[in-house]
Amino acid sequence: MDKLADDTKKEIGHDMAEMKPKVAGKAKSTQRDQAEIAEMFRRLHAIEPEPKGELEHTNAFTLLVAVVLSAQATDAGVNKATRGLFAMADTPQKMLALGEDKVREAIKTIGLFRNKAKNVILLSQALIDNFGGEVPQDRDALVTLPGVGRKTANVVLNMAFGEATFAVDTHVFRVSNALPIAPGKTPEAVEAGLEKLVPEPYRLHAHHWLILHGRYLCKARKPECWRCPLVDLCRFEPKTPIPKLPAKKR
Ligand code: SF4
């Protein structure tokens, strides 16, 4: 298993099978020119000029914790738990003072909560011991923290520090392969493709647009092609037709 696969497993605790594109069907060709990719992002930008991540946070530390907690959990589920947690502890020092038992209790509605509570305490300790209690603006440093892999590091660098990183989660991976924009067999390959192909001025928000597109339109089981703003640029087949209205009862 490659390094990124290991990182992904570190974050989400399951194997790479879940990261394979799950949309039924195939993209016809993998070749794209820059003008087409720019046009896709132009349209996504027009629909949502300032896309935001949906994880609630108040600073770089709470963002980091929220992203660690979001593995195999919905953002809404994480937000529900972190509102109480972050009201009690929004710094590594306060998190350590709170202790693992109380962290576990606060996040018990989230999947894998025991392991995640342990990681939140360990990463708080590591931030204090190694980084002066601050979240480092450095990918190599971030991935040394317990529960933090490349994807989480990229989210933090993007959202907390404004770096144009490409965090490849299951949505970004699927959409990048379906359209395709940056096809690849691993998240690492997709990330490298996005790095190379996404033009300015779309680089900062590209991964958020792809997440939103995958979450709400280009869904894994049934992409909603009939209302997709990228349908004429998409090479994925077969497209999902507009659903038929149920026949009226007599
Ligand atoms: S047309 Fe849109 S929703 Fe359908 S597969 Fe392509 S990108 Fe996804």
Image (cartoon, rainbow, N blue to C red):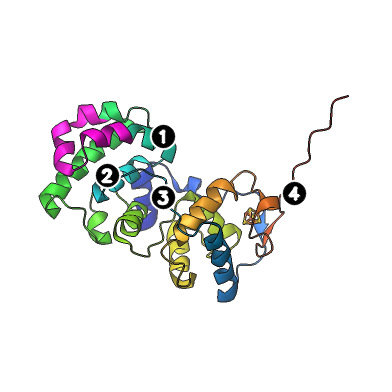
Q: Tell me the amino acid under the disc marked 3.
A: Gly
Q: CA distance from mark 4 to mark 1?
A: 32 Å
Which residue occupies 17% across, 32% down? 98
Q: Name the N-terminal-most of marks 2 and 4.
A: 2
Q: Quadrant of residue 71?
A: top left
- How crowded is the residue under tag 1: few (<14 C-alpha within 10 Å), some, or many (20+)? some
Q: Tell me the amino acid under the disc marked 2.
A: Thr
Q: Name the N-terminal-most of marks 3 and 1.
A: 3
In the image, residue 148 lies in the stretch drawn in magenta = no
Q: Quadrant of residue 86?
A: top left
At mark 1, the secondary structure is: helix
Q: Which mark is residue 241?
A: 4
- How crowded is the residue under tag 3: few (<14 C-alpha within 10 Å), some, or many (20+)? some
Q: CA distance from mark 2 to mark 4?
A: 42 Å
At mark 2, the secondary structure is: helix
Residue that label 1 marks? 77
Left-right relation of 121 to 215? left
Q: Give the residues in magenta.
A: 82-103
Which residue occupies 63% across, 60% down? 230
Residue nearest the observer in this picture, 88 or 218? 88
User: Is the distance from the Cβ of mark 1 to the nearest ligand 1 atom less than 8 Å?
Assistant: no
Image quadrant where one finds the N terminus: bottom left
Q: CA distance from mark 3 to mark 4?
A: 30 Å
- How crowded is the residue under tag 4: few (<14 C-alpha within 10 Å), some, or many (20+)? few
Residue that label 3 marks? 53
